Amino acid sequence: MRSYGQYCGLARSLEVVGDRWNLLIVRQLLISPARYRDLIDGLPGIATNLLADRLRDLEAAGVVERRLAGEGSVVEYALTPWGAELRQPIESLIRWSTPLMVRGRDGDAFRPEWLALALPALLDTRVKVRPSATVGLEIGGPPFQLRATRSGFEVGPHDGRDLDATVRADPASILGLAAGALTLSDARALGLVEIVGDESVIRTVFAA
């Protein structure tokens, strides 16, 4: 492990998670524990040997652990309790990134499951009154759902429950609404979103 040689919490943290891809691996494992192949699929652009090296380093540092999945012998990777504490700084970085996301995808890869971390990070600190509601998200591919509860927001694949409303939009527009960088009125006027169901629920969830 490379050392900055500085008795500083930031320097020592970066010695563990500052290498390229490390925090993105943590992002994937914050969404859910994953097998090696799942991590390859969820990290477009990473070389298989580099992923193996990064996982080995994170495991040695006590951030990641290997365990058997279910009742089988398939190995999956998961965050240790200490590694899971990276959720808060990662969510802070997601909020900080808002000006960088305004230009849209610009050809970059995107995975819908990344919204499972991004949307709660953006909404939890901005939306003061949380209704008990479930909103469908149609952004291309399988539908997702955004659950707004008194304790926070959750994003995942639609599990079949009744939806109060559905938003159809591209990922950049959904992120813009969640960050407050795009208002619902402007998004509708520009033809960026389509709403099916109770629009008042959408306005409350996205603090429009």
Image: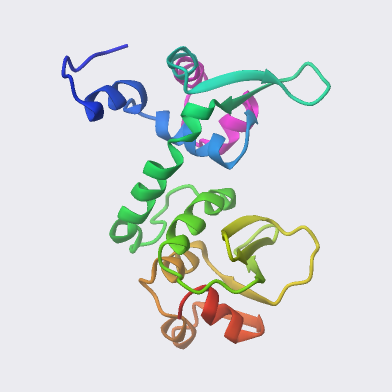
When the figure is inspected, residue 30 is found, relative to residue 183, above or below; the finding is above
Seen in the image, is 147 located left or right of residue 192?
Answer: right
Q: Position of residue 134 (x, y in %)?
A: 67, 69
- Residue at the image position 54 percent from the left and 25 percent from the top: 80
Q: Is residue 120 magenta?
A: no
When the figure is inspected, residue 69 is found, relative to residue 163, above or below; the finding is above
- Residue at the image position 58 percent from the left and 42 percent from the top: 31
Q: Position of residue 58 (x, y in %)?
A: 45, 19
Q: Is residue 41 magenta?
A: yes
Seen in the image, is 197 located left or right of residue 202?
Answer: right
- Number of numbered discs on residues: 0
Q: Quadrant of the N terminus?
A: top left
When the figure is inspected, residue 132 is found, relative to residue 122, above or below; the finding is below
Magenta extent: 35-55
Report the front residue among 78 and 175.
78
Report the front residue among 44 and 151.
151
- Residue at the image position 41 percent from the left and 84 percent from the top: 186
Q: Position of residue 59 (x, y in %)?
A: 50, 16
Name the chief secondary structure element in magenta.
Answer: helix
Location of residue 39 by image quarter: top right
Location of residue 121 by image quarter: bottom left
Seen in the image, is 168 located left or right of residue 47?
Answer: right
Q: Quadrant of the C terminus?
A: bottom left
> Coloring scheme of the render?
rainbow
- Residue at the image position 61 percent from the left and 56 percent from the top: 155
